[in-house]
Amino acid sequence: LFMVDKTSGTIYKYNYEEEKLLDSLKLTFQPEYIDFGNSGLGNELYIPGDGGVLRIYNADDFSYVDEIDVGLPLSSVVSNNNGILAVSCQPDPWWEDPLRVYNRQTKTMIDGNGDFDFTRLRMIPATNEIIEITRNIGPTDLDYYKLDAVGNVLEHKDDPYHGDYPLDPDIFRVSPDGKYFITSSSGALYDVSLLY
């Protein structure tokens, strides 16, 4: 399990079965919502932070590997474990593709889309589909994206409820089978078609 202490800028690697801290990585910047993945280049941690840079570290030994310069403030990243990284950023104006998709190996932007900036992203396991919860608007909103095999946005679907039911970007997990996700302290359940 990888845990982020945003206040101290530290990432911890923890074996929860053995209840043992394995390693820690003290960063020189404040990390946002990270992701773990393997796009064929080994186990990697994708860490968005200040300066619009998505930093990439080896997840096994915490060594620095690479970075992608998005050039905009970043809040979240997800990997499809097949060479695609999607980031939530903060463009100016905000509607100019706040969701951006990158090729991990070439580090080039593939496509962009989105309604809201600076959101929390989650990848549905074993798919090219993303669920997004907003962080800085009220009421909290929800979006769904489907990407093709190379990272182009094929579909974008908006929340049918717009705040009628609980959403929390800090408490947000997709089920291992990819059929539903749970969010908020009340344990609100949604299916991946965004139905409560």
Image: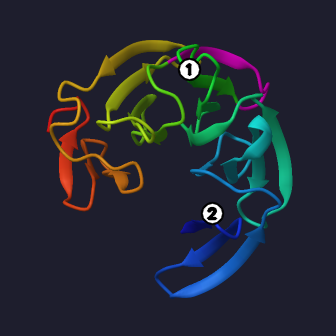
Sooner in the amino-acid sequence: mark 1 or mark 2: 2
Q: Is residue 159 above or below residue 185?
A: above
User: Percent x, y for residue 143?
Assistant: 35, 28
Q: Is residue 86 above or below residue 168?
A: above
Q: Quadrant of the N terminus?
A: bottom right
The number of numbered badges drawn on the structure is: 2
Q: Nearer the viewer, residue 135 or 155?
A: 135
Mark 2, residue position: 6
Local crowd size for mark 1, using a 10 Å CA cut-off: few (<14), some (14–19), many (≥20): some
Residue at image x 44%, y 20%?
115
Q: What residue type is disc 2 on? A: Lys
Colour scheme in the image? Answer: rainbow
Local crowd size for mark 2, using a 10 Å CA cut-off: few (<14), some (14–19), many (≥20): some
Q: Is residue 178 above or below residue 93?
A: below
The magenta segment is: 104-113
Q: Secondary structure at mark 1?
A: loop
User: Percent x, y for residue 36?
Assistant: 60, 52
The quadrant where residue 142 appears: top left
Q: Secondary structure at mark 2?
A: loop
Mark 1, residue position: 94
The circle drawn on residue 37 is: none
Q: What residue type is disc 1 on? A: Trp
Residue at image x 41%, y 21%?
146
Q: Nearer the viewer, residue 44 or 145?
A: 145
